[in-house]
Amino acid sequence: MCTFSEALIEKGELRGEIKGEAKSVLQLVKNHIASNVEQAMDMLSVEPSSREDIMKILEQKL
């Protein structure tokens, strides 16, 4: 059985992973390794379920 605190920790870890992926996507585009965000996410094999969250993070940074 999962406790509330364990669930919060897991959610925080997932958020951290998504922020890390967003940073990696942005670096690929900035360094001209990928021509756009979608290509960068494909190169990094980003899960489809994470792509919308990554796009939201990147919109805030740009």
Image: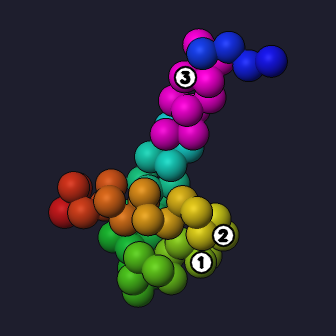
Mark 2 crowd level (few <14, some 14–19, many ≥20, 10 Å Cα): few
Whether residue 46 is visible: no
In the image, residue 53 lies at what x, y percent? 43, 57
Q: Is residue 10 magenta?
A: yes
Q: Residue at x 68, y 14 (%)?
A: 3
Cα–Cα span, label 1 and label 3:
29 Å
Cα–Cα span, label 1 and label 2:
5 Å
Q: Residue at x 41, y 76 (%)?
A: 37
Q: Amino acid at mark 1?
A: Asp
Q: Residue at x 49, y 39 (%)?
A: 15
Q: Amino acid at mark 3?
A: Leu
Residue at the disc numbered 1: 42
Numbered marks: total: 3
Mark 3 crowd level (few <14, some 14–19, many ≥20, 10 Å Cα): few
- Side of 28 relative to 8 (left or right): left
Vertical arrangement, residue 48 with respect to residue 33, above or below:
above
Q: Residue at x 50, y 37 (%)?
A: 16
Residue at the disc numbered 3: 8
Q: Amino acid at mark 2?
A: Ser
- For numbered disc 1, what is the local secondary structure? helix
In the image, residue 23 lies at what x, y percent? 42, 54
Q: Quadrant of residue 1?
A: top right
- For numbered disc 3, what is the local secondary structure? helix
Of pointers 3 and 2, the one earlier in the residue sequence = 3
The residue range painted magenta reads 5-15
Residue at the disc numbered 2: 45
